[in-house]
Amino acid sequence: MVDSLEKLVEEFSKFPGIGKKTAQRMAFFVLKQRREESEALAQAILDVKSKVRYCSVCFNITEEDPCSICKDEKRDRSMICVVEEANDVMALEKTNQYKGLYHVLGGVISPLDGIGPDDLKVKELLARLKDTQIKEVIIATNPSTEGEATALYLAKLIKPLEIKVTRIARGLPAGGDLEYADQTTLASALEGRVEF
Amino acid sequence: MVDSLEKLVEEFSKFPGIGKKTAQRMAFFVLKQRREESEALAQAILDVKSKVRYCSVCFNITEEDPCSICKDEKRDRSMICVVEEANDVMALEKTNQYKGLYHVLGGVISPLDGIGPDDLKVKELLARLKDTQIKEVIIATNPSTEGEATALYLAKLIKPLEIKVTRIARGLPAGGDLEYADQTTLASALEGRVEF
């Protein structure tokens, strides 16, 4: 096989969820693309590395510091939604429901992986909570074991500050099916029931 | 969303079989990669475009002309295996079965897409067949409607030259199941039966 093509297949194989076959199909696609298109792709990769940084306030990814959400005067500055990663912010923003601020932890507490609170932006979150404007912290870590543990840990830290701490609801997803839901989800759905 | 990240997601979405979600996961992976790794990926993309060309003999992809297969004195120069695309050569080479030469057509005859014999490397194949060393042409186009039509077309052209023309066998794939095989495959498997 051609060396440079093999090298590209190898590079693409490093991506999560991209196997050897897909990487090969992608490399052949690059080979068939027009030169300008491949150059645009290469440039986009380099741009992401040189332009994207972390917001010094909420630690979301941004090209300008502070990020557009932290700077936006129209957002509700009394609420902070705590998430694990920057892509969680993107997912929440897509719902167009939440108008408050964010705080990106940069992961979850996971003793097995050697990740403790000091490896996350917890200190920085507590520093932000000194701002008396803040009335509520919504903890939106994932409903996984680590996500739940992190949520509990944060709730314990924040409660003494006399700020309302809430957790996003767990229950059946839209389009879900009782029959196929696992026990934990079903239990959460029952527990979190709301009145008509 | 961050502009440069959005741009990269858009670029990755252009790949065949890569949807919006996968493209997004890939872009975040680039963001988390070390700078050297992203630079290696960008360089690999540019290298494929600048270094890879087509072999002037067999039209396989190569970095040097003629390609390593055409140049290899140990290969059987009495056989040419005709395939649609360069990745078919790769697939056949992996079997370690075939030791002859190749000829890459660059597609198949497909009137619906406006692709006729003149758009493929058919003329170039016929020119190669003037070499009296060549005793057999194996047509290994895909067993699709267009692949079969192209195979028939080529067979008709080559037979008058008094060169043996063969077609790769069709039948049940290894690990296949009679029950789930389609009629055409099953018919081919019966027709192509071999004696014990």
Image: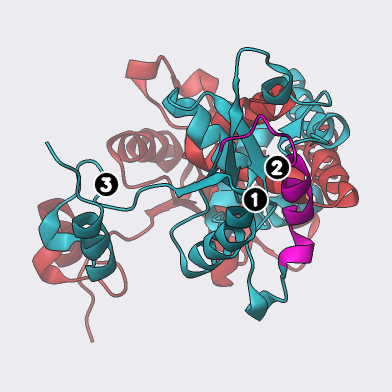
Chain colours: A cyan, B red
C-beta proximity under 8 Å, tags 1 and 2: yes
| Residue A173: image tag | 3
What numbered label is drawn on residue B28? none
Chain letter of mark 2 equals A
Q: Which of the two discs, 3 and 2, labels the residue nearer the N terminus?
A: 2
Residue placed under numbered mark 1 in the picture: A161
Q: Position of residue A154 (x, y in %)?
A: 60, 58
What is the span of residues highlighted in magenta in the rendered image? Answer: A117-135
The tag on residue A129 is 2
Provide residue B158's location: percent of width, then percent of height. 45, 39
N-term mark: 1 or 3: 1
State how far apart marks 3 and 2 are (Cα). Answer: 32 Å
Picture quarter containing residue B176?
bottom left
Location of residue B138 with respect to B1 vertically, above or below = below
In terms of secondary structure, where does tag 3 sit? loop
Asked whether residue B127 appears in the rendered view, the answer is: no
Q: Quick check: A65 above or below B16?
A: above
Q: Residue at x 9, y 68 (%)?
A: B179
**Image depth: mark 3 or mark 2 in front:** 2
The disc numbered 3 marks a residue on which chain?
Answer: A
Residue at 73% over, 37% down: A58
Whether the magenta-drawn stretch holds residue A129 is answered as yes
Q: Amino acid at mark 3?
A: Pro
Say yes or no: labels 1 and 3 on the same chain. yes
Q: Is residue B162 left or right of residue B149?
A: right
Which amino acid is tagged 2? Answer: Leu
Q: Splitting the image into 4 quarters, where does residue A78 fall?
A: top right
**Between marks 1 and 2, how big is the CA–CA gap?**
8 Å
The crowding category of the residue bearing disc 2, from other C-alpha atoms within 10 Å (few below 14, some 14 to 19, many at least 20), is some
